[in-house]
Amino acid sequence: MQLSSRKREILRHVVEEYVATGQPVGSRSLLERSKLSVSSSTVRGELAELETLGLLTQPHTSAGRLPTDSGYRLYTEELVEALEGRPDALGVDLRAMRDEVEDALRATTDMLSRATHLLALVSAPSLETATIRHVEVLALQPTSVMVVAITSTGGVTKRVFRLDGPVDQGLVSWASEYLNERLTGVRLGSSTARRRLEEPDLSPRERDFLGLLGSAILDARVDDGPQVFVGGAPGLLEETRAEELEATLRLLELLERR
């Protein structure tokens, strides 16, 4: 599907904001968050056209938009396009994205501390709490497929699989539909996800294919817990009275272990 660069950018922002918030995205919030240098009427027009193209949908007339399966698919294909010309890196490099999120959380922590003149703590969501919001299975090459899972915490997990024979596009399309139908809202790596990948009414061919792809969801890395960012520790020491110093130092030591 041929879209203008502006439509692609707007679609990307809608998908990412909806994944992050779980709420339909309106033109006003889209302008505020995306910093697009266009008018609100232009954004509304582009959103309406994306809806006409079947990439966005509107729950009711007064609500914002949210991505359709086609919108998610196009968004995911944008990730794949970024891989062209990079044969040694078939995955999406999420390190830069993760660094940006951590930088934003650190800045938020510092801002809260300065505003309140108190110790500030900000907790990032743990992958362990993430549920699956959308899954795409994409044929990359004649013998390679990629599974991309977008999670409720805004994360993206991906895995590339190489097959022994040619990719069956019909099986790939079926797997995308099945995984979205059966796994949306299910926690990453959970026993529920495992059971739904091994349901008895699946054909042997379907079960084998899901058994291969399922590791992208079942073996997703689960961290040790939410990451905690601390701001205002130096100020806390400055304000601490002598009789409270030992307790304050113990608190800071405990926070460092997080």
Image: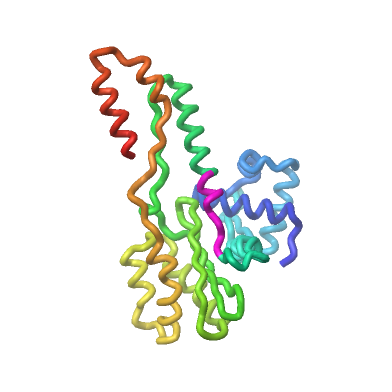
Place of residue 250 in the rendered image (x, y in percent of width and height, measured from the top left): 26, 27
> In the image as oriented, which residue stretches furthest toward the top?
242
Q: Residue at x 51, y 84 (%)?
A: 164
Image-based side of 34 in relation to 126, left or right: right
Question: Would residue 250 be counted in the magenta stretch?
Answer: no
Q: Residue at x 28, y 33 (%)?
A: 254
| Figure quadrant of the C terminus | top left
State which region is magenta.
91-99
Q: Residue at x 56, y 76 (%)?
A: 144
Nearer to me, 143 or 187 = 143
Place of residue 234 in the rendered image (x, y in percent of width and height, measured from the top left): 40, 22
Give the number of callouts.
0
How does the figure colour the protein chain or chains? rainbow
Image-based side of 212 in relation to 90, left or right: left
Establish if 130 lies above or below 232: below
| Figure quadrant of the N terminus | bottom right
Establish if 95 lies above or below 118: below
Q: Quadrant of residue 81?
A: bottom right
Q: Residue at x 23, y 14 (%)?
A: 243
Place of residue 157 in the rendered image (x, y in percent of width and height, measured from the top left): 48, 60
Q: Quadrant of residue 56?
A: bottom right
Nearer to me, 143 or 35 = 143
Establish if 55 lies above or below 228: below
Place of residue 30 in the rendered image (x, y in percent of width and height, measured from the top left): 63, 44
